[in-house]
């Protein structure tokens, strides 16, 4: 085990970047964390936290604080948005917790980010730089130098690119061009529980699957809020994650759905939208003293609900490999990506598959419904053991 203390330059102050800063600071390393926005905060709304996320929270000592801000659904439910039929129900509060030893949670993205960020405040060796955009970097062999838009330079022992889907760091060390546009658009919004139709005020993560569309809704903040995400196929393209949506287009794409879905859509007057993109899985995202994590390394569609979870896993795994690096950070980065690439590639490809399943029409829709109805809740759990069982992730830390 290495007793060396290093200085890490981390580009990107989202969930993955902050988790990496925290994981490395716990080992005594110094951190410069760069965020190009004017402040450290998360945009977006709710995210789902599989049992694998709570294993990490246990390791970081944050489970109690995060749980206090989360909601815990009784069930995971799939509904058919055309017929209104219930397709399958997975008892999350009982079966999932019992099988994996950890709960299935729902949390506002900003709340999770705030807990991680607040914990970082306890480590004086973490320096946070908001409104600081990296324009270039140089790996000089024994050190890495970052250049910013303001003309400043920062020097460290290594650089971690946690700068998301449009990663500047990835562009230089991987160079595989723009992300892959899926042709799917997501609209997101949050409602106070009082405005949610009574029929949908269920403590569940509910997915309404339809032809080339779906709606997801679930409680946040202990049931005080409801998160809504509506996804549909479209050729509209707009770079970025926080653009205003076109309500008229949204309603057009959800024609023919049952009243329970339409009533939820009607409740929202202003939606935020983003175009869903990912990339082909790769196995090499490290070069010298530079590496990537989260969406910068393996961006995935949201259908598996694992983007944030995979980024936090990356952060924890990376810190573990650094701790056992015996002073060779470049080698540690290679060991880290070797430990992660098959798991994250599986998540990327499974997310794509789920998107096709959710949006099935005609005979494919009938087959989907028949298949899901034929599987027991226990079979669902075993089918997702590769993702949720802590032993699967813990093996990558050895």
Image (tube, rainbow, N blue to C red):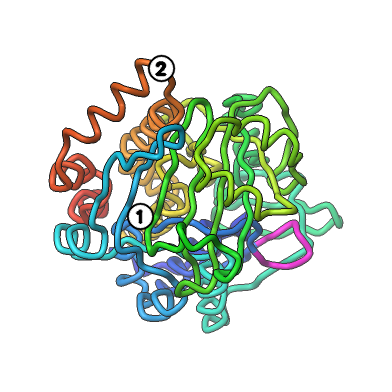
Circle 1 residues within 10 Å: few <14, some 14–19, many ≥20:
many
Residue 176 % position (x, y): 59, 24
Residue 284 % position (x, y): 44, 32
Residue at 46%, 52% in the rendered image: 311
- How many badges with numbers are in the image? 2
Magenta part of the chain = 34-41
Above or below: residue 37 compared with residue 310 = below
> Is any atom of residue 217 visible in this view?
yes
Above or below: residue 395 compared with residue 319 = above
Residue 45 % position (x, y): 59, 59
Residue at 53%, 63% in the rendered image: 226
Residue at 24%, 51% in the rendered image: 90
Q: Nearer the viewer, mark 1 or mark 2?
A: 2
Q: Secondary structure at mark 2?
A: helix
**Residue 35 forms part of the magenta stretch:** yes
Q: Quadrant of residue 93?
A: bottom left
**Which label number is shown at residue 362?**
2
Would you say the magenta stretch is mainly helix, strand or loop?
loop
Q: Which residue is mark 1?
A: 317
Circle 2 residues within 10 Å: few <14, some 14–19, many ≥20:
few
- Indicate left or right for 199 with 343 as reference: right
Residue 115 % position (x, y): 51, 75
Q: Quadrant of residue 58?
A: bottom left
Q: Secondary structure at mark 1?
A: helix
């Amino acid at each position: 085990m290495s007793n060396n203390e290093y200085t890490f330059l981390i580009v990107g102050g989202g969930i993955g970047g902050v988790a990496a800063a925290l994981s490395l600071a716990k080992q005594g390393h110094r951190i410069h964390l760069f965020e190009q926005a004017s402040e450290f905060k998360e945009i977006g709304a709710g995210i789902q936290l599989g049992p694998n996320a709570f294993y990490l929270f246990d390791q970081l000592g944050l489970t109690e604080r995060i749980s206090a801000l989360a909601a815990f659904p009784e069930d995971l439910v799939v509904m058919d948005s055309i017929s209104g039929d219930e397709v399958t129900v997975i008892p999350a509060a009982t079966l999932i917790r019992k099988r994996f030893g950890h709960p299935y949670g729902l949390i506002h993205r900003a709340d999770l980010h705030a807990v991680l960020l607040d914990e970082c405040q306890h480590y004086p060796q973490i320096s946070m730089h908001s409104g600081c955009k990296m324009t270039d970097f140089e790996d000089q062999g024994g050190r890495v130098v970052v250049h910013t838009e303001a003309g400043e330079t920062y020097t460290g022992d290594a650089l971690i690119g946690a700068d998301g889907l449009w990663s500047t760091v990835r562009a230089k060390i991987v160079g595989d061009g723009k992300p892959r546009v899926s042709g799917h658009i997501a609209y997101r919004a949050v409602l106070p529980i009082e405005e949610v139709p009574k029929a949908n005020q269920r403590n569940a993560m509910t997915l309404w699957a339809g032809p080339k569309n779906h709606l997801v809704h679930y409680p946040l903040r202990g049931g005080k809020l409801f998160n809504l995400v509506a996804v549909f196929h479209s050729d509209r393209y707009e770079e970025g994650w926080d653009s205003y949506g076109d309500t008229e287009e949204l309603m057009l794409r959800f024609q023919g759905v049952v009243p329970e879905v339409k009533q939820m859509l009607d409740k929202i007057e202003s939606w935020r939208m983003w175009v869903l993109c990912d990339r082909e899985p790769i196995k090499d995202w490290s070069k010298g003293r530079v590496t990537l994590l989260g969406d910068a390394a393996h961006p995935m569609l949201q259908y598996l609900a694992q983007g944030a979870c995979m980024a936090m896993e990356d952060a924890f795994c990376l810190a573990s490999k650094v701790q056992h690096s015996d002073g060779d950070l470049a080698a540690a980065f290679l060991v880290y990506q070797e430990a992660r690439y098959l798991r994250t590639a599986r998540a990327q490809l499974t997310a794509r598959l789920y998107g096709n399943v959710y949006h099935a029409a005609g005979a494919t829709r009938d087959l989907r419904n028949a298949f899901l109805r034929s599987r027991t809740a226990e079979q669902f759990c075993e089918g997702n053991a590769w993702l949720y069982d802590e032993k699967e992730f813990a093996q990558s830390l050895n």
